[in-house]
Amino acid sequence: MKASRSEFLTVRGLRYHLRHWGEEGAPKLFMLHGWMDVSASFQFVVDSLQRDWHVIAPDWRGYGLSQRSGSDTYWFADYLGDLDVILQHYAPGETIKLLGHSMGGNIACTYAGVRPERIHKLVNLEGFGMPPTKPEQAPARYAKWLDALHDRPPARGYASLHEVMARLQKTNPRLSDARASFLAANWAAQNADGRWDILGDPAHKQHSPLLYRIDETLACWQAIRAPVLWVEAVDTDIWRWMGPKEQFRDEIDRRIGFIQQVKVVHVSDAGHMLHHDQPELVAQHIEAFLEA
């Protein structure tokens, strides 16, 4: 297992944790984790990379060892703002190689359209975006958010690290005990009462009051100038949150069509957490694309 090192950086007033793998003089590759995840999630892919890279992966605000915002709601635009500061710190004036998984992939694609001059190549792992919404959903969405502000359930704790492992393996049965053990130790921390708390602000699970305006997202994707590698898992279950499976495929193909230069690959025997299920194959696709 390749060793990583931690660094803390003040980003827009918050103490951010960033994980580094590799030597600082090696080519940089920035990796962005997804919702309710942490930067250590990329360990298995990093282990599978064949050439030397300086991988830089932040814990997003309110995740892992990064500071929580103190707000009751996290706003998507803040991730773009945080990323902009991080890239300016580590790669001022450079075009960069950027990779994101799930929510991180959505952030990466949006940022690449907003700052197209900053991105050399982009890898999107299962970053499909959110289900489309309609304006008439707004009143109920705001009401649901207001109600949640008055009734915020406490974060669930776990009695042992083994229970955290079991939770991860329930979500992803493909996880081996060894990988689940590593992830659990980075996904949770023991509190003063001896229980294990997830390293993610419970506010991340609150429903956003804002609708997901897919047309605005796709306008950003259409503005991407860099080549994009779009990586999907054959056994992904994300369609369950997006509607019927057939409609999901049509909608995702429509979204991909807005990206000007895109190569689509599919990874077999893998679910949404494909970087845990098939890290060797994912790493092969990444390096073949970045080195082409």
Image (cartoon, helix red, strand yellow):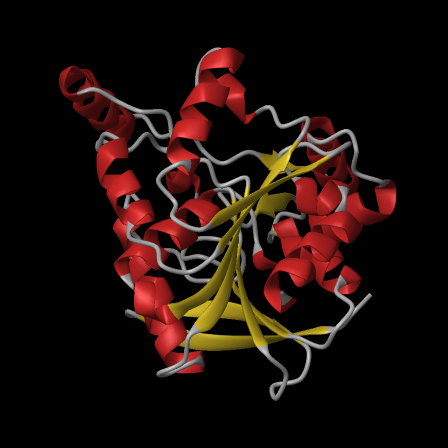
Specify the quadrant of the image occupied by residue 252. Answer: top left
Looking at the image, the residue that sits furthest to the bottom is 25
Q: Is residue 259 left or right of residue 272?
A: left
Q: Depth check: give the residue in front, 189 or 10.
A: 10
Position in image of residue 233 (x %, y %): 65, 34
Position in image of residue 259 (x %, y %): 39, 45
Total labels drawn = 0
Position in image of residue 248 (x %, y %): 47, 20
Position in image of residue 2 (x %, y %): 78, 70
The quarter of the rendered structure image containing the C terminus is: bottom right
Q: Depth check: give the residue in front, 205 or 107.
A: 107
Rendered position, 121 above or below 203: below
Q: Which residue is located at x 47 percent, y 48 percent?
A: 105
Specify the quadrant of the image occupied by residue 39. Answer: bottom right
Query: Do we see residue 264 in this rendering?
Result: yes
Q: Which residue is located at x 62 percent, y 47 percent?
A: 193
Q: Is residue 6 left or right of residue 82?
A: right
Q: Is residue 243 left or right of residue 172?
A: left
The quarter of the rendered structure image containing the N terminus is: bottom right
Looking at the image, the residue that sits furthest to the right is 177
Query: Do we see residue 14 in this rendering?
Result: no
Q: Which residue is located at x 77 percent, y 32 percent?
A: 269
